[in-house]
Amino acid sequence: MASVTDDPAIIVARRYARGATVAAVVVAAGWHLGHDLPVTLTAWDAYRLPWLAAAAWLGHLLVGVAAAIALLRSERPLRGVWAYGAAALAVVVAMLAACPPDRVIGPANWGWGAVGWLAVILFWHRRHHLRELCLFLAADAAIVLAGMLAAGATDRVSLARYLMVLVGSLTLQIGGSVGGHALDTAARWAADASARRAETEAARRSSELVHEDRLRRYEAVRQAAADLLAEIAAGADPADERLRRDCAVGAARLRRLMAETDDEPGPLLRVLRAHVVDAERRRVLVTMEPPVGTVPDLPSGVAEALAEAPARALRAARSEARVTVYATPGEVIVSVVADAEDEEQDAGREDREAVPAARRDANGTNGDGDASWPGGGVVVTKEREGRSLWIQSSWPAR
Amino acid sequence: MDSEQLAGPVRLAVIEDHPVTVDGIRLWLSQDPGRRVELVASGPTIESVLAGPGADADVFLLDLELNGVMVVDRVADLCADGRRVIVFSGHRDPDTVLAVLDAGAAAFIAKHESADHCVETIVAVATDRPYVTPTMAHALIADARPQRPQLSEREHRALLLWFQSMSKASVARRMGISEATVRQYIDRARVKYAKIGRPAPSKAALLARAIEDGLIRPDEVRTYRSFAADPAEPPADSPS
């Protein structure tokens, strides 16, 4: 299943969300460079304290750069964001101080209109971003009103200008922030919806596989039973040794298939079952016990290494074999007991190169267990008792 | 049947709805050189067996599926009056095995292992001694319930090897100990299961006999601790 983050819809949604933040930064930067800078330069001579205006412009720029980097680089706002907010409000105060009393409310005082854009990007990722933005703008408006009172600019024209700029900038700044966040929310909804769709699709694919596997098992059960039943119904002699053996093998097969309740068996059980099916085809009566525990995800090659010696024992089994699997999160043990020929003789018949000397039991004919270490940290131990051969492969080696 | 040695043949009643299986059991009993077990009654339902001469049998062999109905919930009733019940069934998943042991069954034999273990299990159960078939070993090591008894590492290993191998002798060779000690580890693990779940006369008898035989100490009967409560290893067992 493809990762949810690879979903194209989510990538598009993320780009939309990023687009909104980039737009906010561009507006703030554009306003500061395209409006505040020319105004400061053209009104330079009119300022009471022109260098203070220049410092305010620079301070505004620094806060803006810090806020923009934080906004575009990470998902979280600046630490101590209200310190930056205070610095922005200091820009407003500085611009009030830099302007002569008659220009406090004129175009030369760009500060109080511009800092709203700083606040938009400063508070963007804050949880209560709208509330904090409004609080900031209210403080801004209050400072300017206080500045106007201090400068004596309380005439009707000044108040009308104040209100006009206030309403204009509030509308744009709050509107911009709300719109940007709405885009972000919509993008997240789209991403959520897309992730849910991907999950549903994955669940559907998985249940299809499960269904196919059940059909396959059912077919195997049917085959195991139907041919024998048909033979018996056609009058086969129940005393016939061959028929009885076939029935026993068929019954063992049915028991195994009915015990196979795992829908996704994993590589180890898959490999083992394939070898069990091969042995059943040779009319070996195989008892495969349901695994104890859940086989953990094994490092590459370990499942094959674990299955190798048991598979050899199954291939060597003459008429009977019993397969068991024991698993804990840190240990897997596969065991086969079979009435198998001795491995030494067996190797002459089987592919000899597949049985490297290091892995062969040097002492396989007596009862002493012997361990050897093939690759992948798998240990194979072997035990013989009369006609029975007991092969145990375990991982990790201990 | 309280004596150390069997006074006479164990009297067995079989509750099984397939006559062919009863015939099979009769064959196994006849193949036992000591003829230690005698089949005194058999019938297709629990009631039919209890109504006849099987009522006072020493051991009951119960098929878990009678006439298409699972009788797991009848095991506790059957055990309640002190009857020794061995369950034998093809339904050998660990949950079922643990459920019937919990209900008081003395042992569980899977149908495919009956020939090897049937008579031995019956004789052991008749004297209230533990007998663990590989299917029971499977269920005990697969037990993940919080109330499971705490087995020592060696008890667990003996059970695991017994489940996976062909004989206790091979387990003994693998563990480098005597066969008697292997049997002791396996039996101790089984007896620990008599301490959990609902009380039953069969469990009390198993525990009493285990104490009498020196398999466990009386104080161990009380000191049950769950894995969850204390993950520490119990003191190492001393092999005989």
Image (spheres, rainbow, N blue to C red):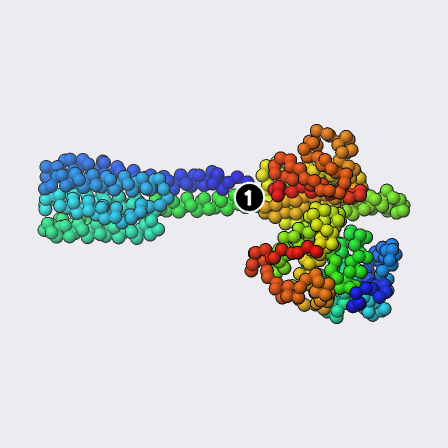
Q: What chain does badge 1 belong to?
A: A
- Residue at x-position 65% and y-position 42%: A394
Please state the horizontal and vertical placement of residue B219, each as a whole percent of the image: 64, 66
Image position of A358 (left or right of A33):
right
Res B49 visible: no
Q: Is residue A31 above or below residue B132?
A: above
Q: Secondary structure at mark 1?
A: helix
Of residues B196 and A296, the one nearer the viewer is B196
State which quadrant residue B205 falls in: bottom right
Of residues B55 and B189, the one nearer the viewer is B189
Please state the horizontal and vertical placement of residue A242, each as a whole percent of the image: 86, 42
Of residues A8 and A369, the one nearer the viewer is A369
State which quadrant residue B147 falls in: bottom right
Please state the horizontal and vertical placement of residue A29, each as a whole percent of the image: 26, 38
The residue carrying pointer 1 sits among few (fewer than 14), some (14 to 19) or many (20 or more) residues within 10 Å by Cα, namely few
Q: Is residue A259 above or below residue B149?
A: above
The quadrant of the image that shows the C terminus of chain A is: top right
- Residue at x-position 11% and y-position 41%: A49
Give the residue type that dot 1 points to. Glu
**Residue on which disc 1 sits:** A201
Image position of B200 (left or right of A137):
right
The quadrant of the image that shows the N terminus of chain A is: top right
Res B194 visible: yes
